[in-house]
Image (cartoon, rainbow, N blue to C red):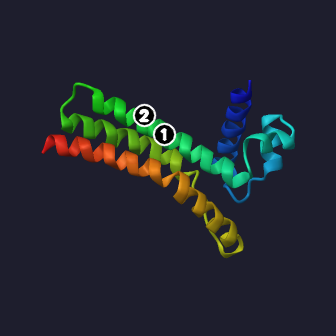
């Protein structure tokens, strides 16, 4: 039940962030769209930035899982890299809509967001790079 509520918050927030942008979306809107009380959000997340970073973590962990699956397949390294490239092109369109545009009005919030991204998201990105690097090394 708790996981369902958390997933509903994340799914709703991702849809709103993609449509309206991070800075234009409010926690109240997320709650209304997810049909939950505002206090419920704070049982799972500290604030809107925490929700956003959790979405990025989920998306990147999903990509990493898919990458490892491709790596384990009985394909040539060239085929693996082509498969990964196709997957990333597809995901990049989805991902692009999630990244907020930063203006001077929201610079403080953006800096706070970047701190969380650096701490929680960058390690996943480094694991993805490492996995791709391993595939390339195997082909050399």
The number of callouts visible is 2
Q: Residue 121 at what x, y percent from top left? A: 52, 51
Residue located beneath label 1 in the image = 61
Image quadrant where residue 112 sits:
bottom right
Which quarter of the rendered picture does the N terminus lie within? top right
Tell me the residue at 81%/41% (across/down): 31
Position of 100 with respect to 82 (left or right) is right
Q: Residues within 10 Å of mark 1 (few under 14, many from 20)?
A: some
Tell me the residue at 48%/43% (across/down): 60
Q: Residue 56 at what x, y percent from top left? A: 56, 47
Position of 114 with respect to 38 (left or right) is left
Decide which of 86, 128 is in the foreground and name it. Answer: 128
Image quadrant where residue 107 sits:
bottom right
Image quadrant where residue 44 sits:
top right
Tell me the residue at 68%/47% (across/down): 51
Position of 106 with respect to 99 (left or right) is right
Give yes or no for contact between labels 1 and 2 (Cβ–Cβ under 8 Å).
yes
Q: Is residue 107 above or below residue 132?
A: below
Decide which of 120, 14 is in the foreground and name it. Answer: 120
Q: Residue 75 at what x, y percent from top left? A: 21, 28
Q: Is residue 103 above or below residue 79?
A: below
Alpha carbon separation for disc pair 1 and 2? 6 Å
Tell me the residue at 74%/31% (across/down): 5
Which quarter of the rendered picture does the C terminus lie within? top left
- Say which mark, if any, is on residue 65: 2
Q: Residues within 10 Å of mark 2 (few under 14, many from 20)?
A: few
């Amino acid at each position: 039940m708790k996981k369902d509520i958390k997933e509903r918050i994340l799914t709703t927030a991702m849809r709103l962030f993609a449509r309206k942008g991070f800075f234009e979306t409010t926690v109240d809107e997320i709650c209304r769209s997810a049909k939950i009380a505002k206090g419920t959000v704070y049982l799972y997340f500290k604030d809107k930035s925490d929700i956003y970073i959790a979405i990025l973590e989920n998306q990147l962990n999903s990509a990493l899982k898919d990458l490892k699956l491709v790596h384990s397949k009985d394909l040539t390294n060239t085929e693996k890299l082509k498969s990964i490239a196709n997957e990333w092109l597809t995901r990049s369109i989805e991902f692009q809509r999630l990244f907020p545009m930063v203006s001077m009005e929201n610079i403080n919030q953006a800096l706070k967001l970047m701190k969380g991204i650096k701490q929680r998201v960058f390690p996943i990105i480094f694991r993805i790079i490492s996995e791709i690097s391993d595939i390339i090394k195997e082909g050399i």
